[in-house]
Amino acid sequence: MIDWLSVLLIVIKLVLIFAVVLTMAAYLVLAERKILARMQLRYGPNRVGPFGMLQPLADVIKLLTKEDLIPAGADRWLFILAPGLAAVTALLSFAVIPFSPPVTILGREIPMVVCDLNVGVLYFLGLSSLAVYGVALGGWASNSKYSLLGGIRGLAQLISYELSMGLALVPVVLQARSFSLTDIVLAQQALPFLVTNPVAFLIFLISVTAESRRVPFDIPEAENEIVAGFHTEYSGMRFGLFFVGEYINMIILSSVTTVFFLGGWLGPVLPGIVWFLVKVLAVSFFFIWMRGTLPRLRYDQLMHFGWKFLIPLALVNVLVTGAVLLWLRG
Amino acid sequence: MPILRDIKGTMLPFWVTLRNAFRKPVTIQYPEEKRQPPARYRARIILTRDPDGGERCVACYLCSAACPVDCISMQSAEAANGRRYAAWFRINFARCIYCGLCAEACPTWAIQMSPDYEFSKYSSIDMVYEKKDLLVDHGGKDNEYNYYRHAGIGVVNPRGGNEDENPPVDIRTNMP
């Protein structure tokens, strides 16, 4: 027999998460434009509504009413599929992220996560690998040299940085002794892993930035070399999906960083959900801040940094963490 | 140590951007705030009047000859007192490049550049300004100057009768 109540609860959680994440993505775009503008001594969007608060709405209307063009030489079905892949894989990752301690309503304990997988870390890593298909297929299906170059760059970059990201998570799993994200958060009761293993945090943060294809790792869409990279040929809402996917991805990766290294919902005084939101927004702000600060890396610099520095460092870190843990536990 | 230099070069910019994020933006919010252009700013062209209220333009065609894009056209005429004027005077601002050569060519200070830059139109035919649109009721950059009080044929004073003028010379007295 199916427990209809738990199905209903999952649906409610899904709807809530969709609403919150999509709204956050829309306003993250606005926040990014505003913050970048202030860092460059401009005002940013402030014409649509008070303080430009309706700007995301105006953007959506613009994107929806724009001409939707599919190039004549494009691989039609892949071309249509790619933006969806980019956005959906980003959204799906949120299923395993615990955003609050379990709540008890009417004597029933409800975990504040859509699905507490016992292999949550692997699920997240798998989905973030799938996300590259959006970039690669979009770049390949467009049948344009810039798109293809962007797609190839995206592929190469994601493969390189996936490795160091996975390796940076190994110490976390070692310390928490679990693949479940809820357990990882609970293992940080005493100290967040940011404090106990700052090297892993640094490697993870850098890899995550590369993973989300944001400045200074935005070479798949480097404007001044390859027009707009993999989404050169996209217009209207298809481009919008890529765009929104990037920001959903940013939220996901901020949440994941929060869960793995900043102690998730744990924090004094304030309720768990508030702490979680504050931490996610802080990491998102750091991403935006970094975009306003650092210039784009050259392609070979990116590869050198990934393969010759980050991955060896992550490997050494895994070894050292493992040795220290073994020693501590006798 | 290059690695220390690299770390410093990566960290310091974060402080710079954060510091600048709290400074006042330099943007001028255009329709609400407007920048006062300098007095010699070259925008809409005007036809000025002399302090006695007469039109300064003597329809000499020098401005239209100087104009590199040929956007000035006019027809000269002569009043009963011998004063020349433009029967019609037309500037096509859709074509004008605001180079100011017409104002430099003008011998009577009639045609001048004004700092009024806000005159966009929906249709380019509306950018064609006739004499009535160009004429203003002041002297522009020089409110004192009246061409006919310094030179020209006897409109204000008899010929050669202005203060800084000599009477006409009988050319035959110059012969050896």
Image (cartoon, coloured by chain):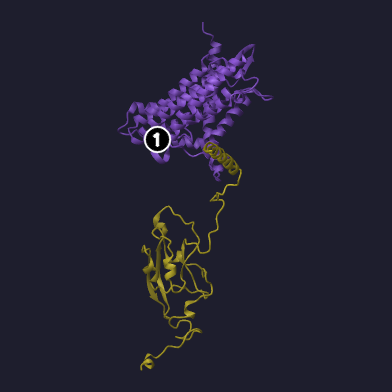
Chain colours: A purple, B yellow
Closest to the observer, B132 or A309: A309
Q: Please determine whether, in this image, residue A319 is positioned above or below residue B90.
A: above
Total tally of numbered discs in the picture: 1
Which residue is rendered at x = 49% and y = 63% of the image? B114
**Residue at coordinates 53% horizontally, 61% vertically from top-left?**
B38
Residue at horizontal 36%, vertical 69%?
B65
Which residue is under mark 1?
Answer: A229
Host chain of mark 1: A
In the rendered image, is residue A54 in sight? no
Give coordinates of residue B93: x percent, y percent.
Answer: 41, 60
Quadrant (top left, top right, bottom left, bottom right) of the C terminus of chain A: top right
Q: Percent position (x, y) of residue A108?
A: 62, 11
Whether residue A325 is visible here, answered yes or no, is yes
> Label 1: few (<14), some or many (≥20) within 10 Å?
many
Q: Quadrant of residue A144?
A: top left
Residue B12: x %, y % from top left: 57, 40
Say which residue appears at 47% left-offset and 79% top-offset.
Answer: B148
Q: Is residue B5 above or below residue B150?
A: above
> Residue B34: where, in percent of width, then height?
55, 54
